[in-house]
Amino acid sequence: MSKLLANPRIATSLVVSAIALIGIAAATRLQDQSSRSILTRPAPPPDHRIAYGKDPLQFGELRLPKGSGPHPVAVIIHGGCWMAEFGLSYMGHLAANLTEAGIATWNIEYRRVGNEGGGWPGTFQDVALGTEYLGTLAKTHSLDLNRVIAIGHSAGGHLALWLAARKKLPKDSPLHHDGLLQLQGAIPLAAITDLRRTGTACDRIVSKLMGGSPEDYQSRYQQASPIELLPLGVKQIVIQGETDNIVPVAMAKDYAEAAKRKGDDVKLVVIEKAGHFELVDPQSFAWPKVKDEVMELVKFEKKGDSK
C-alpha cells in the first residue's frame, strides 16, 4: 500500500474516490432511511444470470414474466457514480416488480471507474454490448424486440439516455456500434443528464469516467453527454424526486426543457417529497407513479395495441 501511495497519480486517484464516496454517503444520509436500505436489502433472485461478453463484469440478470410472450423488455441500468464500488444488486427490486407486471427485465452489469477497462470508452461499450445481446437472448426467450425501453437510475439514467442517442454517433467514434436494436423509449430516474454541469454527488467522478476534463476532451463529452446529443428521437419520461440531494431537480427540469426545444417527445415527472432512492424502491410511496409511467410507455410503443 505504501508503494501505491508513493505514486502521485495513484494517490490522487484514491483520494478523489474517497472524497466522492464520503460525499455520496453524506448526501444519501439525508434521504429517506427506509428507501436507502434498498442498497443492502436482498433482491429477489433473477431467473437467469447470463454473460454478454468475456469480462467477468459483462453479464446481466434476466427476469421473465409468466406466459408465452413475446414480452416487452426493459433494459435496467444501475447507478453509483459509474464507480466500481456500486453494482446492480439494488436494481433487482425494481426489475423483479416490473417482471411481475409483465415486462421482461435485463438488469445489466458493466465495467466502471476502478475496474480494468472501465471509464471511457469501456463503460459505454459494455452498456451498448449488453443491450445488443438481447438479440441473442430473443432466440431462446420470448422477447419482443420491437418494445425495448431503457430504465436507468442516477449515473445509470445518464447511460439509459446515452443508449437512446448512440445511433447519432459518428462512425469513427470508439462508441459507435452498428447494432440493429433500437430503443423505443427511455426512462431516466434521477439521472445525470449533463456531464459538464456541476452540483451532483458524482461531480468528482465525471472526469475519471471521461479520462479528463471537458477542456481536455471536448469531443468525448459531446459524444457522451445526453444534453449535447439532443434530439434523441425517442420518447423520454424524465422522473425526478423533488427533494433529491444527490442529483438536483433542476438538472431534470433543464434537460426536459432543452429536449422539448429540440423537438423530442419528453414528459417530465417530479414526485413531491421523493428523494433519490424512492424512485427505485417498490416499497416506497413514489414507486406506483414510476411504475405507471413505465407501463404506459410500454403500451404506447406497441403500435396498434389497444390493451
Image (cartoon, rainbow, N blue to C red):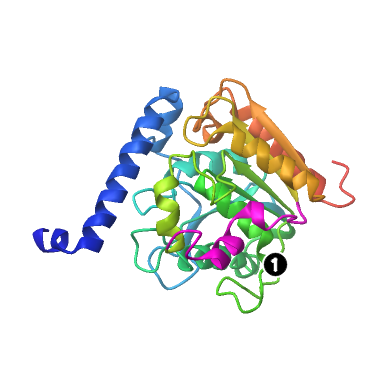
Secondary structure found at label 1: helix
- Give the left or right position of residue 126, taking residue 9 as reference: right
Q: How far across and how far down the image is residue 41, in percent?
A: 39, 35
Q: Nearer the viewer, residue 295 or 234?
A: 234
Q: Where does the magenta region start and end? A: 212-234
Q: How many marks?
A: 1
Q: Residue at x 18, y 64 (%)?
A: 7
Q: Residue at the bottom extreme?
A: 172
Q: Nearer the viewer, residue 274 or 41?
A: 274
Q: Compared with residue 244, is residue 46 higher up or lower down, i.e. above or below?
A: below
**Do we see residue 154 in this rendering?**
yes
Q: How far across and how far down the image is residue 82, in percent?
A: 44, 53
Q: Residue at x 35, y 62 (%)?
A: 115
- Give the left or right position of residue 175, taking residue 203 as reference: right
Task: Indicate the quadrant containing the N terminus: top left, top right, bottom left or bottom right.
Answer: bottom left
- The quarter holding residue 142 reads bottom right
Q: Nearer the viewer, residue 124 or 179?
A: 124
Q: How far across and how far down the image is residue 228, in percent?
A: 65, 56
Q: Residue at the left extreme?
A: 2
**What amino acid is found at the position of numbered circle 1 in the picture?**
Lys
Q: How far across and how far down the image is residue 169, in percent?
A: 66, 69
Task: Indicate the quadrant containing the C terminus: top left, top right, bottom left or bottom right.
Answer: top right
Q: Compared with residue 39, is residue 192 higher up or lower down, i.e. above or below?
A: below
**Do we see residue 69 in this rendering?**
no
Residue topped by disc 1: 167
- The quarter holding residue 260 reads top right
